[in-house]
Amino acid sequence: MKQRKQPCEQILAERLYAWCLHLYPRAHRRTYGPLMLQTFKDHCRETREVQGRIGITFWLEVLADETKSVLREQLSSIQGGIAMQRVWNKPGVFFGLLLGVLAIGTIVWTTVLFPTFESDSEYQTTYAITFIALFLFFALVGVLASRKTNRLLSGTWAGAITALLGVGIAMPTFVVIDNLFLDIVSHQADKISGFQHSTFHTMRDYINAGLLSGVIVVLPVMAAVGAACGTLGAALRKLLPFSRVSN
């Protein structure tokens, strides 16, 4: 009896995943590599049977899981710490750190490398798109976090943690960058206008006071927004076709 030929997309997916296994520590790869590859093959086949193809949702889930797992195992192999594994197992930690890294790069890019001195009102459309993308990101985190537990609360916590970590990294970055590159920041139109109408004696004091107020207000607000979006994502996940494959 002839063996049924595998579809090309599944063959490519399996080869790609086999290559990704080399990102794990050698000891982990020797012990769990064959089992992980077989599990991935089964998941590919099940996804194709249910959805008819291996789509972007499938790869988003794989990317999120494998990136988190690789970082956790690499850190664990270096430090050998149980506490580190527990931290990485918390939903939202990886995505919060990822968001924080992206925030650092964006802040350095727009403030130091390619600074803009126009008023923020000139970028209202850009800011609106950025916030919409951010809210969708929190919702996606909620979808992925609730995938294993099938609980709305998992999405809530993951969204809140992602927002807290991301904003918690971004705000100190603003403090450091704005103080180190005060000569650049002090030429921004909104900073000049705000300082002229304030009671502060120096631009540095004015900027730092604004940043402190931002931390006090933005952190809890964004945590609440992240929690709400994460909950919404977890709720919507139950309505999506691929949720049946994951459970």
Image (cartoon, rainbow, N blue to C red):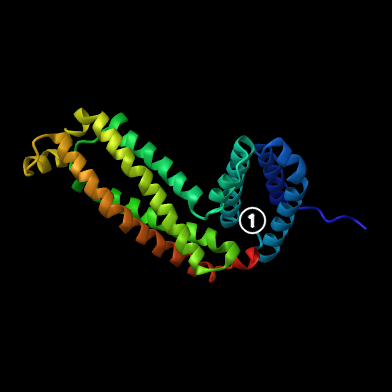
Image quarter of the C terminus: bottom right
* Circle 1 Cα neighbour tier, 10 Å, few/some/many (<14 / 14–19 / ≥20): some
Residue at the spot 30% in from the left edge and 34% down from the top edge: 176
| Residue highlighted by disc 1 | 54
Residue at the spot 50% in from the left edge and 68% down from the top edge: 152
Q: Is residue 246 above or below residue 190?
A: below
List the single residue furthest toward the bottom: 239
How many numbered discs?
A: 1
Image quarter of the N terminus: bottom right
- Kindly state the secondary structure of the residue where label 1 is placed: loop
In front of the other: 219 or 183: 219
Instruction: Using residue 206 as the reference point, say whether residue 115 is left or right of it.
Output: right
In front of the other: 118 or 30: 30
Residue 58, image x and y in percent?
60, 56
Q: Of the residues shown, which amino acid type is indicated by label 1?
A: Ile
Residue 5, image x and y in percent?
81, 53
